[in-house]
Amino acid sequence: MTHDVTHHIPEPMLADYAAGRLGHAFSVATAAHVSLCDECRARLAAHEAAGGAVLETLPPEPVSDELMARVMARLDDPAAAPPEPPRPSGIYPGPVMAALGGRPPRWRSMGAGIRQAMLHAGPDGSLRLLYIPPGRAVPDHGHKGRELTLVLQGAFHDETGRFGVGDVEYADESLEHTPVADEGAPCICLAATDAPLRFRGLIPRALQPIFRI
Amino acid sequence: MSETGDALSEQTRLLIAVRDRRDRQAFAALFAHYAPRLKAMLRRGGMANAQAEEVVQEAMLAVWRKAAQFDPARASASAWIYRIARNRQIDMFRREGRPVPDELAEELAHDPDAADALALDQETRRLRDALGALPPAQREMIERAYLGELSHGEIAAVTGLPLGTIKSRIRLALTRLRHELKDLRRP
């Protein structure tokens, strides 16, 4: 499926994904967006073309003699094949299904009808799904680091624009915004950050470690 | 074979032979060409010798297994193998594995447009020439970024490379493929 996507992955992030330099949380969000957006699929492929051009011009480094024989011997060994990546299911692209471990999200209430499901929390950042009822605002928040939010269902709008299915909003420390879910279907988003969020309302800061937000 | 634009690059032709005929000789030729280059790339990224060879082995096995997904209208052999190698590398070394975008089609039900493949091949050659023609300092930065030594956030915008034209080519091929897939799925 593709959608009328108007907000895309920032260029350096796409290039870092291609080069394998992007952390896990942002990588999931990037791969999920590319699943929904042919423009970024083509932009990513262009970066891979550049990576391929660099690879092609590198001075070769000899490999050990038996490496080719070892690979040729294993070509048709089905036991050696890694598992296939999960398929998309419902509103969730394959990379999100993988982060969910193939199971439905385990939502936790954050109050005011807003729910979240943590998918990953590590030193390089965190990844979660957010469920925002129609017309509801996500409390005003600023960012310590970078945040990438991908809409999977419904839509939201904030001071910078409107974001529908497939759109990503990229925010850094300079953006303080109040996303509000559109009327209609509840808004479900995938949110990747490389630092904890600082909420201004709703949950006191002292509780933030408990909610891991 | 002519290299002036009326034929696909040798590597892309080899990969098509692997895809369509499971041609082991063609695969051996691809291995001979790419294994030492992939090893050089991984070593430049800071990997030890034995580890680098292990990734090369897994990457080349993935090239064989996933060849059915190769579409020369959307990637040259070098671009596609670069992607496969990055995916395997991260799968092996990051606990969570590599998140990869959904494939458009598990196997191509059609013969990709030959003209699209040739056009992309030409652009790929132009890209390589442009890389070679850059001032050494700028070329070094771009190499380091795609070799994984530097983040793209750390360098100034990747300028001097005709990535826009390559992107437009691939975008066109994607649109065509989407139409074909839609026709296939129509009852």
Image (cartoon, coloured by chain):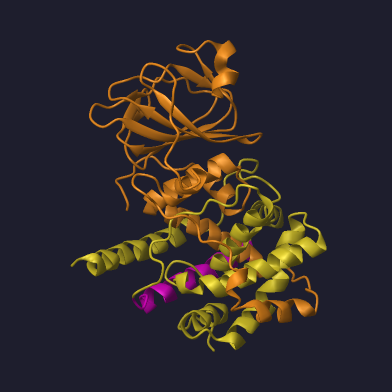
Residue A207 x/y as whole percent: 56, 14
Identify whether B89 is placed above or below B26.
Answer: above
Report the front residue among B110 and B185: B185
Residue A195 x/y as whole percent: 60, 28
Position of residue B21 in the picture relative to residue A52 (left or right): left
At 57% across and 71% down in the image, what residue appears?
B63
At 68% across and 76% down in the image, what residue appears?
A71
Report the front residue among A182 and A10: A182
Helix, strand or loop for the magenta stretch, by majority: helix
Q: Which chain is orange?
A: A
Position of residue B115 in the picture relative to residue A208 (left or right): left
Task: Count numbered badges in the picture.
Answer: 0
Hue used for the chain lettered B = yellow
Residue B60 x/y as whole percent: 63, 71
Residue furthest to the left in view is B187
Position of residue B139 in the picture relative to residue A40 (left or right): right
Residue A130 x/y as whole percent: 42, 30
Magenta residues, start to end: B110-133
Identify whether A148 is placed above or below A27.
Answer: above
Which quadrant of the rendered structure holds the C terminus of chain B? bottom left
Report the front residue among B91 and B138: B91
Is residue B67 shown in magenta?
no
Is residue B132 shown in magenta?
yes
Q: Does residue A11 appear in this view? A: no
Identify whether B63 is placed above or below A146.
Answer: below
Which quadrant of the rendered structure holds the N terminus of chain B? bottom right
